[in-house]
Amino acid sequence: MHNPNQILTRKMELESKWNRLFLENNRVTPEMNAIHEEIRDCRRQLVSISDTNAKYDPLNFQDDFLNFNYA
């Protein structure tokens, strides 16, 4: 599994490329469809990492907004 920052960087690069191609072609091309699939894969990886982190990082309920003795 890659670092989330690497995945996010890759996703942003792909989105930038997709946008540039759209501006150049004024339509969606087969190459852009392939890029779109890569973007979707990046999103899936990021969601998977987020879900995994949510399962293993316990919530901390000692935050100030939940502490009634803060006044």
Image (cartoon, rainbow, N blue to C red):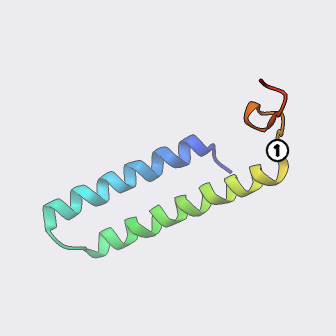
Q: Is residue 27 above or below residue 53?
A: below
Q: Give the residue displayed 22% in from the left and 55% down from the top.
A: 20
In the image, taking residue 32 as reference, residue 24 lies left or right, namely: left
Front-most of residues 64 and 7: 64
Question: Label 1 sits on what residue type?
Answer: Leu
Crowdedness of circle 1 by 10 Å Cα count: few (<14), some, many (20+)?
few
Q: Give the residue displayed 54% in from the left and 64% down from the top.
A: 41
The x and y percentages for residue 62 are 83, 33
Determine the residue located farthest toward the top in the rendered image. 71
Element under label 1? Answer: loop
Residue 48: quarter of image = bottom right
The x and y percentages for residue 67 are 82, 33
Q: Give the residue displayed 73% in from the left and 35% down from the top.
A: 65
In the image, taking residue 22 as reference, residue 49 lies left or right, namely: right
In the image, taking residue 68 as reference, residue 24 lies left or right, namely: left
Residue at image mark 1: 59
The quarter of the image holding the C terminus is top right
